Image: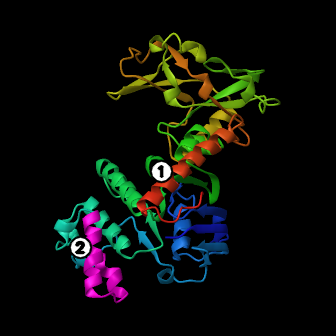
Amino acid sequence: MASIEMRNIVKQYGDGYPAVNDVSLDIADGEFMILVGPSGCGKSTLLRMIVGLEDITSGDMVIGGKRVNDLAPRDRNLSMVFQNYALYPHMTVYENIAFPLRLSKTSDDEVRRRVTEAADVLELKDHLDRKPANLSGGQRQRVAMGRAIVRQAEAFLFDEPLSNLDAKLRGQMRTEISRLQRRLGITTVYVTHDQTEAMTLGDRVCVLRKGKIQQVASPRELYEQPVNLFVAGFIGSPPMNFLPATPNGNRLTTPFGDIELDPSRTAKLAGHDLLLVGIRPEYFEDATLVDEAKRPLGSTFRARVDVTEWLGDSQFAYIPYEAPESITAQLQELSRELDSEALRTQAIVSIDSTSRIREGREAEIWVDTRKVHVFDPHTGENLTRDAEAGAELTRMATQDRVEQVDEARGGATAVGAA
């Protein structure tokens, strides 16, 4: 097992475009780190530089305390699982898993022991004599993971391993990967464009945008204390709503009425003529269903509902609003970058499944103003972010992970805090 340190990593191609631009990131021994972002953000390129499949233009890659920039992939002792499984179709499951051991001329007895152990962990013992063509997508991915396990590598690297699976199977495989990583306590770097995978799998998540790190934090900190507009829009499904607002002391005037903030959260709002208010869909509710004791903690407004979607356990209501042209253009640009049609001049409101709100009618909506974020529309900075509260969320998650790794390794050497 080993830590991975990236120090000012840059990757430029022949045309001078920086696919990865000055990335510095420390991944602790035993940590599960997620690299996430939209297409073209540099996450897969960064992963390939860790394993040695891409040259590093500048900066240092340090694995287990050793600089590895000039080492070939085979000399880095890392195991990589690819999106397309990369299995040999003419080999049995047993031989596919055993392949890296055969290359290293491991004895037959040791090969048999390691393959059997990996197959037991991955529930593949009944399939060892089968060929990949006769397996399901999930079974093939487990074979690829088995091949990674038997190497006893310093770290696992996953490059969008679940992209080829259907939605139900992706959910099952997420659980298996999480359980496996916690059982082995091995350093893991996992690339995905799916923020659901990022939020459910990682100890910490690194959000990338155009080759640069935006925020590195626990999933909960990313969700509750996003550092900027990009992270707030990327994390969450449906994404955070963004409403234009004009400040007046502690009060913000939005298309849906006034929102009053606690004075302690308005220190950075002075001097701004126009702001963006960020509110997640789940922080809204049908006002008729809100407990009277809870009402004073938020604000209530009336608005016409354009469309409703009933999902069984919940509902979504879509409420359009008017916005200045500059805000509309900015949201459209962000929507294109995030490949999300939701970021438009409409609010998505999550309401209880029992709500009687109907499309085409006016409804009374309550919003929890304690959880409102305010962004500078020019810089994207979150002006109401509580950095101390966010850091505490990540610290707690890191400590939990240290304890889990120690337990997985039988109480061996403690993992350094990230």
At horizontal 78% and vertical 21% (from top left) the residue drawn is 249
Residue 335 visible in the displayed image: no
Helix or strand or loop: what does disc 1 sit on?
A: helix
Q: Is residue 200 left or right of residue 110?
A: right
Q: Camera-side residue: 398 or 213? A: 398
Q: Camera-side residue: 131 or 118? A: 118
Looking at the rendering, the stretch of residues picked out in magenta corresponds to 97-121
Outermost right residue: 271
Residue 185 rendering spot, x and y as whole percentages: 44, 62
Rendered view: 66 above or below 107: above
At horizontal 29% and vertical 47% (from top left) the residue drawn is 168
Rendered view: 236 above or below 28: above
Q: Quadrant of residue 391?
A: top right
Main secondary structure found in the magenta portion: helix
Checking the image for residue 198, the label placed there is 1
Residue 256 rendering spot, x and y as whole percentages: 60, 18
Q: Is residue 125 left or right of residue 211?
A: left
Rendered view: 297 above or below 107: above
Checking the image for residue 93, the label placed there is 2
Helix or strand or loop: what does disc 2 sit on?
A: helix
Mark 2 residue crowding within 10 angstroms, few (<14) / some (14–19) / many (20+): many
Mark 1 residue crowding within 10 angstroms, few (<14) / some (14–19) / many (20+): many
Quadrant housing the C terminus = bottom right
Tell me the kind of residue under disc 1.
Answer: Ala
At horizontal 59% and vertical 13% (from top left) the residue drawn is 296
Q: Is residue 139 left or right of residue 249?
A: left
